[in-house]
Structures are given as C-alpha cells and as structure tokens.
Amino acid sequence: MSVILKTTNLNKSFDQGKEKLHVLKDISLEINSGEMIALIGYSGSGKSTLLQIVSGLMDFDSGNLEIFNHDIRNISDAKRTEIRNKYLGFVYQYHHLLADFTALQNVMMPMLISGVDKKLAEISAYEVLVKVGLQDRVKHKPFQLSGGQQQRVAIARALANKTKLIIADEPTGNLDSENSANIIELFWGLVRENNSTLVIATHNKEISDRASRVITIKDGRLI
C-alpha cells in the first residue's frame, strides 16, 4: 500500500466575532491506498471540516496537506481543481445533484469536466447507473426520484470517473434505516470493485464495524 493522502499538523479556525473558534488542532494523518476508513465523532467535533480540507475544498490555517504527492498548499486553484476532478469522488448527506439535468447527465458531468469523450462518458454513466439499480431512471431528473434513488445517483456520480479516493460525509444521514442499509451495502461493494480508497464520516456503527480503520475526532483532535 502507498500513502495517497497525508496531513501534518493541520490547523483550522473560524472567526467568531472577536474570537477564533479552533475547529481542527494539529491533525496529522496518513491514508493508504485501499483503506476503508470510518471517521467518527460527535456533531461539531470537526469531521466535516476535516473532510472539506482533505478534499481540497477548504483552505487551512497552518500545517501541510499532500494529495497523491501534490502539495496542496503550494499549488494554484486551477491545479487544485484538476487534482480533485482526477483523483477524488464525493458523496454528501445531501445529494447535490443538478436539478435541471437527468440522472444520466449528472453522472456524466465529472467525466465531461475531465475531458472524457461525450459518448464514452454516456456509456460509462449508464453502466454505473445499472450497477446501482437505476437503469429505468436514467432520464429522470432529481425531483422525479425518491431520496434513496437520489443518493444512488450521487454514489454513481462519485464512482463513474473511477476516482481513487472517495470522500463521503454522512451519505445515509437523510435516509430511513432500510434505505440506509441498502445504500451502504451497494456503496461498499462498488468502492471495492473500483479498487478505490474510502474515507467516510458516519454515526452508523454498522459502517464503522466494517471499516479497515476507525479514526475518532474529538474537540478538533484525532484520538
């Protein structure tokens, strides 16, 4: 296994009136290829902030972050965007699908942005939608889908580009227990099939029990 993501003494704070709220404190972490990591902690512990930072979506105050050997602190915004699109896939608690686009078009989007031929993107998007059981919903827009179906599209979108690192922030947080169990089983299998690495923030014990490593964050520090 090789190290694909590394943080060293990472710190993040937010202005809160005249004071600063220190959300992350000296976070040092290495993530290896092929790992399935569960990130756990109470609400407000810093889980989402940490995921936003290691995704290259949020700046940090001090420390270092390397994603696939790229020093994120010392590259341009354009290069950072390129790295995210090439290497990372995202699944959030809310699906964040584009309302005016069909399920197929939503899944195609990351591939089109990365320069994949439109026809190939369409074929790949359809194939992964079949895997998540939505072959009869490819032309449906988000408002025509149930909550579980919307999240299946979001998972398909994260995996369609065969990204090597999947970042998931409470991906079943808005679903009932039956849908949640089905989505996680599906998600886990597809990540394995893709040979991707998974970092998933969760309160779900069934998820953390299946992880190859569990990381706990409390009051902005890793335990």
Image: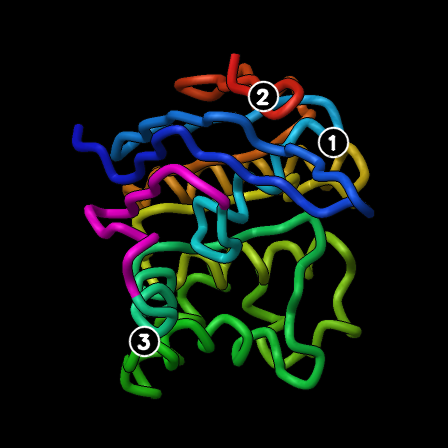
Report if the CB atoms under discs 3 and 1 are less than 8 Å apart: no
Residue drawn at x 39%, y 25% as measured from the top left: 28
Inter-mark Cα distance, 3 to 1: 34 Å
Instruction: Give the number of the disc on residue 114.
Output: 3
Q: Measure how far apart labels 3 and 2 are at the Cα level.
A: 33 Å
**Is 73 in the magenta?**
yes
**Residue 182, image x, y percentages:** 64, 38
Question: Label 2 amino acid?
Answer: Ile
Q: Amino acid at mark 3?
A: Ser
Q: CA distance from mark 2 to mark 1?
A: 10 Å
Q: Position of residue 153 (x, y in %)?
A: 58, 62
Q: Position of residue 25 (x, y in %)?
A: 54, 26
Q: Secondary structure at mark 2?
A: strand
- The answer to which of 11 and 190 lies nearer the viewer is 11
Residue shown at 32%/76% (left/top)?
Answer: 114
Residue 203 image-quadrant placement: top right
Sooner in the amino-acid sequence: mark 2 or mark 1? 1
> In the drawing, does residue 156 fall left or right of residue 172?
left
Q: Are marks 3 and 2 in contact (CB under 8 Å)?
A: no
Disc 1 residue type? Gly
Label 3 vs label 2, nearer the camera: 2
Vertical position of residue 29 compared to residue 188: above or below:
above
Magenta residues (range): 61-75
Where does label 1 land, which residue?
44
Question: Who's the residue at 25% across and 39% down the image?
Answer: 4
Furthest residue in direction top, as rendered: 223
Q: Which residue is disc 2 drawn over?
A: 217
Say few, some or many: other residues with alpha carbon within 10 Å of mark 3 (under 14 / 14 to 19 / 20 or more).
Answer: few
Position of residue 37 relative to residue 63, above or below, is: above
Pick whichever of labels 3 and 2 is earlier in the sequence: 3
The residue that appears at 65% across and 76% down in the rendered structure is 98
